[in-house]
Image (cartoon, rainbow, N blue to C red):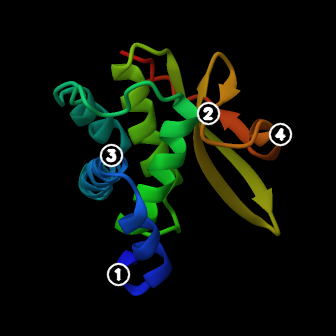
Amino acid sequence: MWFSNGKIIRRFIALPWARKREILWLARKLIWIDRQLKLCGLVSARKALLELPDLPNNLFVDISPRQIARTLDQAARISIGKNETCLRRSLLLWWILTKRCAQPQLRVGVALRDGNLKAHAWVEIDGQPVNEKMNISNLYKPIELGAFPSQ
């Protein structure tokens, strides 16, 4: 976690206040999404997200979806850790981009690795990954979620 890594704390302290505010806001939302997923599942977590009020006006001003995704990665490191976070990060990014009037798609893909079924989540806009490498759909075969349009 964030409190056991002095390097992360030093980097965070050195950031401008606006960036800290964004990271802390994202970290709080990631923790909330983590609880929603554990208690209610994906469909209910999505529904609860869509019922939240709009984004605060002073967050994510004039930054690209990729920059938001990078900030979200930083927030994940200080809030819920690095492991098992792709669905949480992607769900929150999907919601933020939906609120910013983009047309994001939440994608979940599966792959068989060393005899084990692996899953991964990411967000795309116009068929291009926002929070992942461009070849992610070659590594994980996307499955249809059906219930995840932008609105």
Observer-side mark, 3 or 2, equals 3
* Label 3 secondary element: helix
Task: Determine the residue positioned at 42% across, 18% down.
Answer: 150
Q: Which residue carries the number 3 mark?
A: 22
Q: CA distance from mark 3 to mark 1?
A: 18 Å
Determine which residue is flagged by label 4.
Answer: 138
Image vertical order of residue 38 relative to residue 134, above or below: below
Residue 102 in the image: state x and y as whole percent: 47, 15
Residue carrying label 2: 130
The numbered mark, 4 or 3, whose residue comes first in the sequence reads 3
> Against 122, is 94 above or below?
above
Residue at x 45%, y 48% (from the top left corner): 72
First in sequence: mark 2 or mark 4? Answer: 2
Tell me the crowding category of disc 3: few under 14, some 14 to 19, or many 20 or more residues within 10 angstroms, Cα based: some
Q: Earlier in the sequence, mark 3 or mark 1?
A: 1
For this view, does 12 lie left or right of residue 132?
left
Asked if residue 105 shows in the view, the reply is yes
